[in-house]
Image (spheres, grey):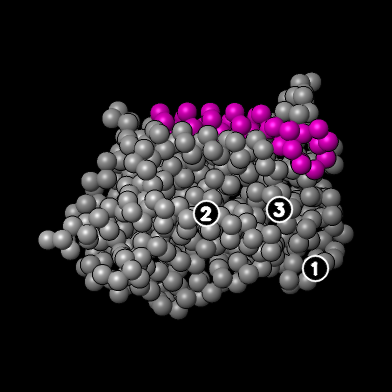
């Protein structure tokens, strides 16, 4: 076999092995939807509306979320078809491995690792900001050095974000206890979070000033699209839902419901939140770490600000749970294929949870959260997400042509095939091109590191390639 063919060797798919992965099957459509809402409606809804309005779209931030939701919905349909056809852990990584081959799958998997790592880290930083806001209400204040990462705007002597570091480790401890327990905690917190969002909208809507909506698009259509590119940061939750395929009781039915249902609920909440937020506070003043609590303070509703800060902490906790979960399952899937050390795929005999993978991922994410400022993390999440969306979208075209998978009766099919998957692919590429040069440079560095790891370790330890070598010898 030629070297180029070895790089593009595809993962064989055997439906008989779909139920033999070792992970416990304990999730249903409701728990998946709660996972999706838990991940999507969290850090994004309490952070990004303010950033997008202040830096890019102005009062039109609500339309940025609409654009992002439309593009995400196209990608979500593609994810739903893959997830119901190939119910295996690993999400987009596994799908690309099946239809495009190992090297592209590794590149995508490596970029998704950065997505989950930086998503967890950025949410932990905002969690820390809101939690410190709560503590200050009780007269408790951390030493400035331990309150934020070095280089954080407005914090002169910042050095290490202690609270962000601790909360990631605490969530890791929760996850190693078992999937069912984690999803139960997540579902309760999601309900609390939605109640807090409704409270903010119900209180703040009476303080909306029509003058704050002018000029509606201060940076034109270009700013609107830039805002939509950043809004993707808020919508990555359904990607994490797809990593749970192997732990779902009835993936053919439940995966599409969980992915699409969570996106619909989240989109409604995001647009409503952005519309009210920019109506209450002029968009130029919203580039802060806790814009929702800030808005309530501006309108002198401090009683509600405290509740919102508590809700934000609870809400962002659900994001940490789901994104940490997604990252560990991604590492599990990649390790199971031999592309990462076997420590990442070892399961606890009692809980059937990849404990080592969870702790390794959690420790790395906690360190990132403690030492990297928020504004340097956020956009690094987006490019990995968009890349995954693009590959999954175009991958549906090849999925339909896959000889083995054609024989599988998927419960969900993308409508308007092949037009919709191609449109989704092009839309994702377009939004990627609107990200900052800094983001592309950091993405290039990350991918370069990944390629080095692949040829130094992964290429030689690939289980599929080892099987092919054995067949060639025979």
C-alpha gap between disc 1 and disc 3: 16 Å
Q: Nearer the viewer, residue 471 or 107?
A: 471
Quadrant assignment for the C terminus: bottom left
Query: Crowding at label 3, few (<14), some or many (≥20) Cα neighbours within 10 Å?
Result: many
> Residue 401 lies in what quarter of the image?
bottom left
Q: Which mark is residue 49?
A: 3
Q: Residue furthest right?
A: 211
Q: Which mark is residue 219?
A: 1
Residue at 71% over, 53% down: 49
> Residue 295 lies in what quarter of the image?
top right
Quick check: marks 2 and 1 in contact, CB under 8 Å?
A: no
Give left or right: position of 395 versus 86: right
At numbered mark 2, what does the secondary structure look like: helix, strand or loop? Answer: helix
Give left or right: position of 199 versus 97: right
Q: Position of residue 324 (x, y in %)?
A: 49, 41
Query: Crowding at label 1, few (<14), some or many (≥20) Cα neighbours within 10 Å?
Result: some
Q: In this picture, is 386 found above or below 398?
A: above
Residue at 72% over, 28% down: 146
Q: Nearer the viewer, mark 2 or mark 1?
A: 2
Give the residue at mark 2: 449
Give left or right: position of 473 versus 460: left
Q: Residue furthest top?
A: 139
Q: Nearer the viewer, residue 98 or 55?
A: 98
Q: What is the span of residues highlighted in magenta in the rendered image? A: 148-177
Q: In this picture, is 336 found above or below 84?
A: above
Tell me which numbered mark, 1 or 3, is placed earlier along the sequence.
Answer: 3
Q: Is residue 153 magenta?
A: yes
Residue at 74% over, 51% down: 50
Q: Nearer the viewer, residue 333 or 18?
A: 333
């Amino acid at each position: 076999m030629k070297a180029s063919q070895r790089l593009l060797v595809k993962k064989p798919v055997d439906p008989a092995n779909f139920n033999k992965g070792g992970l416990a099957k304990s999730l249903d459509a409701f728990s998946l939807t709660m996972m999706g809402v838990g991940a999507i409606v969290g850090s994004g809804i309490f952070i990004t509306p303010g950033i997008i309005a202040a830096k890019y779209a102005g009062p039109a931030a609500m339309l940025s979320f609409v654009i992002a939701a439309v593009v995400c919905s196209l990608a979500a349909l593609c994810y739903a078809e893959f997830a119901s056809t190939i119910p295996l852990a690993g999400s987009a990584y596994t799908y690309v491995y099946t239809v495009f081959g190992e090297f592209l799958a590794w590149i995508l998997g490596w970029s998704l690792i950065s997505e989950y790592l930086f998503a967890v880290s950025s949410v932990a930083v905002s969690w820390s900001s809101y939690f410190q806001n709560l503590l200050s209400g009780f007269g408790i204040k951390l030493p400035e050095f331990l309150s934020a990462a070095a280089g954080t705007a407005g914090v002169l002597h910042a050095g290490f974000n202690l609270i962000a570091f601790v909360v990631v480790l605490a969530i890791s401890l929760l996850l190693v206890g078992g999937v069912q327990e984690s999803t139960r905690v997540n579902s309760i917190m999601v309900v609390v979070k939605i109640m807090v969002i409704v409270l903010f909208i119900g209180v703040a809507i009476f303080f909306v000033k029509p003058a704050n909506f002018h000029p509606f698009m201060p940076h034109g259509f270009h700013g609107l699209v830039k805002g939509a590119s950043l809004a993707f940061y808020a919508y990555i939750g359904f990607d994490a839902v797809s990593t749970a395929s192997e732990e779902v009781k009835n993936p053919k039915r439940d995966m599409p419901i969980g992915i699409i249902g969570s996106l619909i609920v989240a989109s409604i909440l995001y647009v409503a939140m952005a519309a009210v937020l920019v109506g209450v506070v002029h968009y130029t003043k919203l580039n802060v770490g806790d814009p929702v609590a800030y808005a309530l303070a501006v309108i002198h509703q401090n009683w509600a600000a405290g509740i919102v800060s508590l809700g934000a902490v609870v809400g962002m906790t659900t994001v940490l749970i789901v994104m940490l979960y997604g990252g560990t399952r991604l590492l599990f899937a990649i390790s199971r294929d031999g592309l990462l050390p076997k420590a990442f795929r070892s399961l606890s005999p009692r809980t059937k949870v990849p404990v080592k993978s969870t702790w390794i991922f959690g420790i790395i994410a906690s360190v990132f959260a403690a030492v990297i400022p928020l504004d340097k993390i956020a956009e690094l999440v987006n490019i990995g997400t968009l890349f995954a969306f693009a590959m999954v979208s175009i991958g549906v075209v090849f999925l339909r042509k896959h000889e083995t998978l054609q024989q599988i009766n998927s419960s969900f099919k993308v409508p308007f095939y092949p037009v919709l998957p191609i449109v989704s692919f092009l839309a994702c590429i377009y939004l990627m091109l609107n990200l900052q040069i800094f983001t592309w440079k950091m993405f290039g560095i990350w991918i370069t590191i990944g390629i080095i790891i692949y040829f130094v370790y992964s290429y030689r330890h690939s289980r599929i390639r080892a099987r092919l070598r054995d067949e060639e010898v025979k």
